[in-house]
Image: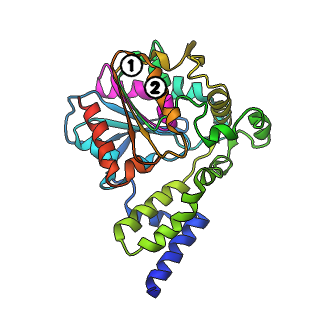
Amino acid sequence: MDPNVKNEFFEMFSKSVSKSYSDEDRKKLGLEPTPKREVHSQGPWKLYRYDSSKKSKHPPVLVIPSLINKNYTMDLLPGHSLMEVLVNSGLDVFIIDWGRPDASTGHIGMAHYIGKYLKRAVRQVKSITGAKKISLLGQCLGGTMAALYSAHPELKKDVDRLALLTAPLDFENSGMLSMWTDPASFDVVSLTSAVGPVVPADFFHSSFPLLNVRASLSKYKNLLEKIDIPEFKKIWQALDIWANDNVDFALQAFRDLIKLFYQENRIMREIFELEGEAVGIRNIDMPTLAVAARDDHVFNDNATRGIQKSKAADNGNLSYHVMTAGHVTVIVAHPVRNETFKLFQEFLTR
């Protein structure tokens, strides 16, 4: 092996294992390429609006990312960005950055995130654009939140269309995480009793490499074999930076995720308490797109198929697609990302 290539590999390997990426690494790669500006903030979260020279004739789109990762997986690199595609399609796109919880927000649970924070973000998008209704696009747990918002009898009046990307809804038998969080062996209150108001990112994310051990071990072998391919090397490092850029969890929100979602499956049982109502998937009736990943190691297709229990499915308003990809590769890997991008583009501009 060329000594320069060997040195480059070990430098990338070292930064990955030690999680020592710098701002210069991020800048050099050009992460989050689609221009945006902050238009609102409240507590830990901010609302951004993507820049566009076009006046949209479609309802504005609010993108709701997961609480457990940074949102730029959807705006990774030029040509590998769902946000870039949507903005270039003439859509007026907003995105939430959930920020980092601190001691003052440890008591905030999932219902607060949806019924207060998400509700405020929706109201801000409506106020800024003058739109009567908007479209919601939720990714991963952000999709879970978007679905619950769209199931509430009053909140759903804001929603024109609902788009879900690898969004778990049915948490029973939804993969390895559902087995590991079985209430018989996982007492979430006891396990988090000493962490304080914020659950450290490593407490949750340390389990993720174990969901697909083979992939976790082979990523460096793949890098070594393809390090002379510039585009592969760039995408590999961009994804690795994102995967290591983990976010802490507000204590109550984490406990809600485990107890209310995984252990009690309240969404499918129609008993999740939100703004004075017991809600679940059944009451989603607006046009809905749900995109799942066949090889998703975080949430299997049983989790995403929960949307098929909705009224939208009954009345022909559901478009459900399973892509041959993983939880993240569904929007970053070639060529499947182009198919995924097209589905969301066509659905939101219809």
Marks 1 and 2, how far apart at CA: 8 Å
Q: Percent from the top left, x then y, of residue 91? A: 26, 36
Q: Nearer the viewer, residue 101 or 156?
A: 156
Q: Is residue 71 magenta?
A: no
Q: Is residue 108 left or right of residue 144?
A: right
What residue is at 44 percent from the left and 60 percent from the top?
A: 238
What residue is at 39 percent from the left and 20 percent from the top?
A: 313
> In the rendered image, is residue 118 in sight?
no
Q: Nearer the viewer, residue 212 or 197?
A: 212
> Which residue, given by chain and number where applicable, does mark 1 sit on?
312
Q: Quadrant of the C terminus?
A: top left
Classed neighbour count for the residue bearing mark 2: other residues with Cα under 10 Å, few (<14), some (14–19), many (≥20): many
From this view, report whether residue 87 is shown above or below residue 127: below
> Which residue, given by chain and number where applicable, does mark 2 sit on?
307
The residue stretch that appears in magenta: 118-145
Look at the numbered disc 2 and give the secondary structure of its residue: helix
Q: Percent from the top left, x then y, of residue 275? A: 55, 16
What residue is at 77 percent from the left and 33 percent from the top?
A: 184
Please, which residue is most extreme toward the bottom here?
3
What residue is at 49 percent from the left and 76 percent from the top?
A: 9
